[in-house]
Image (spheres, helix red, strand yellow):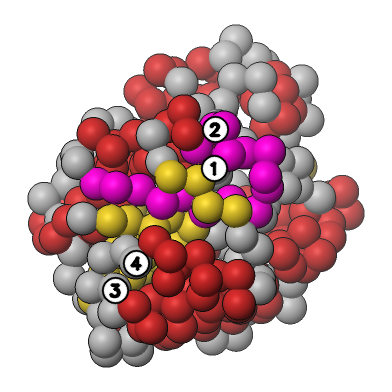
Amino acid sequence: MRVFLAGATGAIGKQLVPRLVAAGYEVHGMTRSESKRAVLEELGAVPVVADALDADQVAEAVARARPDVIVDQLTAIPESLDMRHAVREFEPTNRLRTEGTDHLLSAGQAVGVKRFVAQSNIAAYAMTGSAVKNEEDPLDTDPDSLAAPNVAAIRHLEEAVLAATWTEGIALRYGWFYGPGTSMAPGTEIYEMVRKRKFPLVGDGGAVWSFIHIADAAEATLAAIEHGKRGIYNVADDEPAEVADWLPALAEQIGAKRPRRVPRFLGRLFGGEFAVLMMTELRGASNAKAKRELAWQPAHPSWRQGLTAA
């Protein structure tokens, strides 16, 4: 069976390719950069160089590979985010989640792919009601102006994938990645900010984050490829946690002093409104459906042990 993986050199792509190869799949890994051919070859994939925003290039690449499954892991999130300019920072990823996904769907329909698995995110849930959301809970219908483009792009992706009646359309709402190759790993900016006490608790720190180790995310994706059914799955660990819980715990684990606490207005001044929402209003996600229907269990069931291991 052939799998066409768009975004094959991203954090999850690098974890997913060797798992697919080990499971016996022929993997065609797409990247925009010619320089990343060697990376894909080392991982065991057939390199495909194409621009996801060029419909003709995508159509040609997919037609050449003739895959049974397409996996859409397209993102372009900067390693260092400027949360004060969140709209600008997420714009490239939002284009990939809309235009890029549409190009892959069109190309996939032309060759008759049996399953289409796409990366979504738990951040689009409404920031009201229960602290931990399941797949039946609504997405944000009135997001803050800074979050609106991100929610709109995620909504577009999910609706397009699930509306593709010619294939088994699956959207995976991943939690917050940590581990190798992600923005949450030793030596990354976030860890250094925590170490230097430049990552404060804002307000009550009541936002709920659901984490997922990048290796567990790849395993869940493999399970979706093999026996997922049309629909949406939250992919997160077993322990959603308030920022007021996980941030001090992370500081302790890496030997840093306890984070400072600042009022919302100071958080807004230095980090912008989007950062304040991430620290005070965000909702977590339940993984019960993915565990039940994908027969998947995270090897890192809690960020408490996972972050230490990372």
Q: CA distance from mark 1 to mark 2?
A: 8 Å
Mark 2 Cα shell of 10 Å, populated few (<14), some (14-19), many (≥20): some
Image coordinates of residue 128 in percent, x first then y, are 48, 73
Image disc number at residue 258: none
Residue 287 lies in quadrant:
bottom left
Q: Which residue is mark 3?
A: 113
Image coordinates of residue 7 in percent, x first then y, are 53, 53
Name which of mark 1 and mark 2 comes first in the sequence. Answer: 1
Say which residue appears at 66% left-offset and 73% top-offset.
54
Assign a secondary structure to mark 1.
loop
Name which of mark 3 and mark 1 comes first in the sequence. Answer: 1
Assign a secondary structure to mark 2.
helix
Residue extent of the magenta highlight: 25-40
Q: CA distance from mark 4 to mark 3?
A: 8 Å
Residue 122 lies in quadrant:
bottom left
Assign a secondary structure to mark 4.
loop
